[in-house]
Image (cartoon, rainbow, N blue to C red):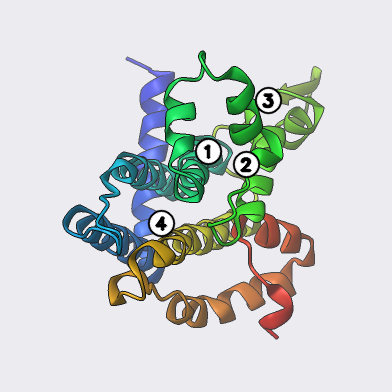
Amino acid sequence: MKSEYLSYSSKLSYNREAFLTNYIEELAMFEESNALLDNLVLFIQKTRDINGYSHVSLLLFIEIIKRQATITFDCITRFQTFTAWINFRPALESLLIIGKFIDNPQNTKIWMNKKEYRKEFKKEFTGKGLVSQSLPLASKFRELLSKINDEFVHSNWNYLNKNYQQIVTNSGYVFKIPYIDKDFFEHRAFLYSFLHIYRLMIVSIGKALEPKFGHKRELHIDHKIMEKVLKPKVLKLVNERSDLVNILKIFGIWKLEKLH
């Protein structure tokens, strides 16, 4: 039996195997980020802050970040970046909510009782209000959240124009929406962006918690080693396709001027 779905599924399996064969270092970086996040979870579970308070309420959001990051990475391995960032959106939202909870514990009450505190919720959890004072790079994370909405969530002209293909046939023009990434340079840009921003998110959580817990070793999360490994790959990509700089800057928060 000829099955369009089984053919599609087979292509995804092939893509994943090809990716895991050719991007061994990148897989290791992703796994390391997950391990760093797990260590952060263990620290929060076992440790009270300098005032004796627990912050276990943050753990569900951290677990959402890990789940969505794993799904996002899987989409990238299948060469489906157009759906990867849709799945990453809840991870960014969870991160920003963590920042708001750290800013002010009263924000937890507002968040949990949205209907009762409509005015306060709108102020603290929408628009620029989501930019936490405690979370490093919060404005960049918020900017990316809006960018994902524009580029990958809503079927506006920008989304359609980016996704369709125009094919010439004997009977005229045919428009198709591809199910697999066709621009492999852009795919690499999104891969390097995801790996970098995921690590930065974990670093930011650690730094945001420092004023609560003090300078604990478990909160100092390294991203410089990963950057050093990725640096030549990112530079090579930019030299090949300078038009991908904005993707790396916005989706990955790469500071490209510091890479030269």
Q: Residue at x 64, y 59 (%)?
A: 185
Residue designated by label 1: 89
Q: CA distance from mark 1 to mark 2?
A: 7 Å
Between discs 4 and 1, the one toward the N terminus: 4
Q: Is the Cβ of the residue at disc 3 closer than 8 Å to that at disc 2?
A: no
Identity of the amino acid at label 3? His
Identity of the amino acid at label 2? Leu
Residue designated by label 4: 19
Q: CA distance from mark 4 to mark 1?
A: 23 Å
Please tell me whether residue 68 is drawn above or below residue 207 in the rendered image.
above
| Tag 3 secondary structure | loop
Q: Residue at x 44, y 44 (%)?
A: 72
Residue designated by label 3: 154
Residue that lies at the very extreme toward the bottom in this rendered image: 260
Residue 160 appears in which quarter of the rendering? top right
Q: CA distance from mark 1 to mark 3?
A: 13 Å
Front residue of this view, candidates 173 and 100:
100
Q: Is the Cβ of the residue at disc 1 closer than 8 Å to that at disc 3?
A: no
Identity of the amino acid at label 4? Phe
